[in-house]
Image: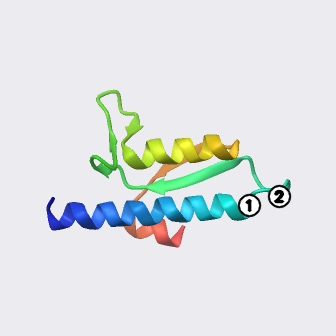
Amino acid sequence: MSLLTNKYFILCCLVAALLCAFGLTQTGTSDRSATLIVGLQSGYPPFEFRDQQGNLTGFDVELSTLIAKKLGKQVVFQDMDFEGIILS
């Protein structure tokens, strides 16, 4: 694996851990939104990219979809520049 791929793998693992932690802390609260919003930048296969039909796919997309399903929420993906993800 290249150094760049290792950095994105670590970043994706951290994002997944944060999503899991957020989901665990929100269990049992009924006043929260039924939507999980995930910000990502779609230019980094295999983590997040667009397929031939233009749909978002990849590890992060599939993991986020499974987490949202486990939490009983709908997932919405927002494709944005990497610098904007932290600020959002």
User: What's the distance in space between the residues labelled 2 and 1, CA to CA?
Assistant: 6 Å
Tally of numbered tags = 2
**Front-most of 79 and 29?**
29
Residue furthest bottom as drawn: 87
Q: Residues within 10 Å of mark 2 (few under 14, many from 20)?
A: few
Nearer the observer, 36 or 84 = 36
Position of residue 53 relative to residue 41, above or below, is: above
Task: Give coordinates of residue 60: x percent, y percent.
Answer: 42, 49
Label 2–label 1 contact, CB within 8 A: yes
Quarter of the rendering occupied by the N terminus: bottom left
**Camera-side residue: 23 or 40?**
23
Whether residue 14 sits left or right of residue 37 in the image: it is left
User: Can you name the residue that lies furthest to the left here?
Assistant: 2
Residue type indicated by callout 2: Thr
- Asked if residue 59 is positioned above or below residue 55 in the image, the reply reads below
- Residue at point 85%, 56% (across, down): 31
Name which quarter of the figure residue 40 lies in: bottom left
Q: Which residue is mark 1?
A: 26
Query: Which corner quadrant of the image does residue 21 belong to?
Result: bottom right
The local crowd at label 1, few if under 14, some if 14 to 19, many if 20 or more residues have their Cα within 10 Å, is few
Does dot 2 land on a helix, a strand or a loop?
loop
Rendering coords of residue 29 (x, y %): 83, 58
Farthest top residue? Answer: 53
Percent x, y for residue 66? 54, 42
Residue lying at 73% horizontally and 46% vertically, measured from the top left: 34
Q: In the picture, residue 28 is in which quadrant?
A: bottom right
Q: Residue at x 38, y 39 (%)?
A: 57
Q: Is residue 19 left or right of residue 47?
A: right
Circle on res. 18: none
- Amino acid type of disc 1? Gln
